[in-house]
């Protein structure tokens, strides 16, 4: 694990140097993945790293956990509450679409959640621009393979250091780095709505996705879920599609 951490820290330093940037920033959600990234960038850039806490209609417990993560690695931090900003933006959109009779309440739930993720990324890039930092993402191998992230939200970043680590490996790294145990053991959640958890929404577990990625046999039901999610999310892992050149 020491070698893995050292490898990622060196890689982060190299990529920031290549970009002629000053350091790195991450959104700290109170979850395990962003906690690990916060620790990694603090090690890579002790004086030039930042953790940004961005509650947006969030569970207060998430902010408490985020503060625990900040304290555990000693990274500089700011808190920017996006709740009011989201209310204005999403409220105006709802008003306009309701006026013309096209508002879809069922689809709005996911649109609301994705808007929060994209507001956070907009905020991260604005703050990163202020410091000359690169934005570091938190997606692990399971999330990347299944597309369990918001396109141009938490998926819209400069660097993805955890993308080759399974969720289990992220947990191991978290314990090695000193992430608070309460953060490590909490049910993974994107905080999209009250009571939301990743595994309930996906219909399978991170342990089974990890096993699938390692080439192990998993129940047929779970294999089909994982492969369907991967196929449907291919566009998230690709650049915007472009037509063939004119001849």
Image: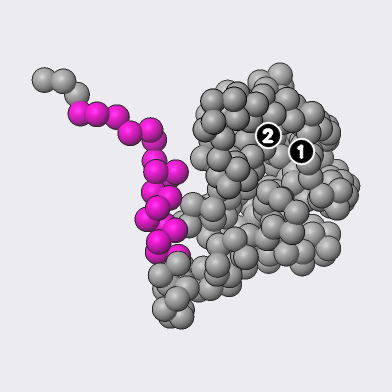
* Residue 86 image point, x, y percent: 72, 31
Residue for point 55% across, 67% down: 203
Residue for point 54% across, 53% down: 148
Mark 2 lies on a secondary structure that is: helix
Q: Which mark is residue 120?
A: 2
Residue for point 58% across, 70% down: 205
Q: Quadrant location of residue 239?
A: top left
Q: Is residue 242 magenta?
A: yes
Q: Which mark is residue 167?
A: none
Badges 2 and 1: C-beta atoms under 8 Å apart? yes
Q: Which residues lie in the magenta part?
A: 226-244
Q: Quadrant of the N terminus?
A: bottom right
Q: Nearer the viewer, residue 89 or 11?
A: 89
The answer to whether 147 appears left or right of 17 in the picture is left
Few, some or many residues within 10 Å of mark 2 (<14, 14–19, 20+): many
| Residue, far left | 247
Q: Quadrant of the C terminus?
A: top left
The answer to whether 138 appears left or right of 70 in the picture is left
Above or below, comparing residue 188 to residue 73 in the picture: below
Q: Quadrant location of residue 184?
A: bottom right
Above or below, comparing residue 24 to residue 231 in the picture: above
How far, Cα to Cα, is label 2 from label 1? Answer: 9 Å
Q: Quadrant location of residue 99?
A: top right
Q: Is residue 191 among the parts visible in the rendering? A: yes
The residue to which callout 1 is attached is 56
* Residue 153 image point, x, y percent: 58, 38
The answer to whether 10 appears left or right of 213 in the picture is right
Mark 1 lies on a secondary structure that is: loop
Q: Is residue 33 magenta?
A: no
Pointer 2 or 1: first along the chain: 1
Q: Nearer the viewer, residue 121 or 192?
A: 192
């Amino acid at each position: 694990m020491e070698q893995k951490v050292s490898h990622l820290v060196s890689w982060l330093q190299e990529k920031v140097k290549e970009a002629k940037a000053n350091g790195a920033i991450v959104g700290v959600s109170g979850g395990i993945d962003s906690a690990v990234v916060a620790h990694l960038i603090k090690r890579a850039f002790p004086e030039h790293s930042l953790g940004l806490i961005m509650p947006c209609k969030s569970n207060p417990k998430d902010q408490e956990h985020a503060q625990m993560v900040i304290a555990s690695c000693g990274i500089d931090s700011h808190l920017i509450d996006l709740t009011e900003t989201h209310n204005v933006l999403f409220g105006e959109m709802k008003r306009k679409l309701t006026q013309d009779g096209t508002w879809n309440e069922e689809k709005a739930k996911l649109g609301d959640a994705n808007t929060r993720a994209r507001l956070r990324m907009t905020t991260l890039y604005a703050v990163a621009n202020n410091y000359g930092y690169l934005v570091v993402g938190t997606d692990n191998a399971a999330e990347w393979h299944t597309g369990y992230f918001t396109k141009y939200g938490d998926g819209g970043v400069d660097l993805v250091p955890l993308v080759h680590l399974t969720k289990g490996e992220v947990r191991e790294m978290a314990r090695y780095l000193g992430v608070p145990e309460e953060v490590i053991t909490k049910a993974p959640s994107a905080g999209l709505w009250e009571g939301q958890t990743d595994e309930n929404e996906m219909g399978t577990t991170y342990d089974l996705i990890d096993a699938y990625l390692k080439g192990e046999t998993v129940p047929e039901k779970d294999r089909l879920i994982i492969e369907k999610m991967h196929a449907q999310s291919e566009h998230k892992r690709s650049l915007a599609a472009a037509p063939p050149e004119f001849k």
